[in-house]
Image (cartoon, helix red, strand yellow):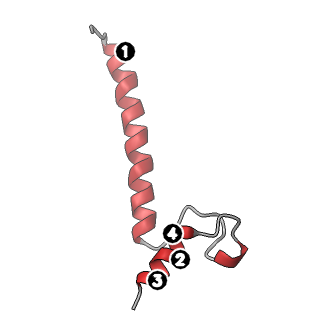
Amino acid sequence: MDMNWQSWLVLAVIVAILAAIAARGIYNRRRGRSSCSCGGNCGACGMGCGSHKQDEAAAP
């Protein structure tokens, strides 16, 4: 596979965007923010905020 410099540039930009999205997700998760749109009110969440329930069950 012979890629020219423009192809490498596009690939680098896509990888950088994906890395930034992943880093932001990790950053938010470590600070207790979630991607769930319920705002922390798991009773009002349509998804049931499964991740919050697991965290609460693990807490002493």
Q: Amino acid at mark 3?
A: Ala
Q: Nearer the viewer, residue 44 or 28?
A: 44
Name the N-terminal-most of marks 1 and 3.
1
Rendered residue at 59%/69% (across/down): 49
Judged from this view, the residue extending furthest toward the bottom is 60
User: Is 30 drawn above or below residue 3 in the view shown?
Assistant: below
Q: Which mark is residue 55?
A: none
Mark 1, mark 2: which one is toward the viewer? 2
The residue sitting at 71% across, 65% down in the picture is 46
Amino acid carrying label 2: it is Lys
Bin the neighbour count of mark 1 within 10 Å (Cα to Cα): few under 14, some 14-19, many 20 and up.
few
Foreground mark, 1 or 4, reads: 4
In which quadrant is the C terminus drawn? bottom left
Rendered view: 7 above or below 30: above
Name which residue type carries label 1. Gln
Q: Secondary structure at mark 3?
A: helix
Callout 1–callout 2 Cβ contact below 8 Å? no
Q: Nearer the viewer, residue 38 or 43?
A: 43
Check disc 2 and report the residue beneath it.
53
On the image, numbered disc 4 is attached to which residue?
A: 51
First in sequence, mark 1 or 4: give its number: 1
Q: Are marks 2 and 3 in contact (CB under 8 Å)?
A: yes
Q: CA distance from mark 1 to mark 2?
A: 46 Å
- Provide the residue designation for mark 1: 6
Picture quadrant where residue 11 is located: top left
Instruction: Report if the CB atoms under discs 1 and 3 are less than 8 Å apart.
Output: no
Q: Residue at x 34, y 29 (%)?
A: 12
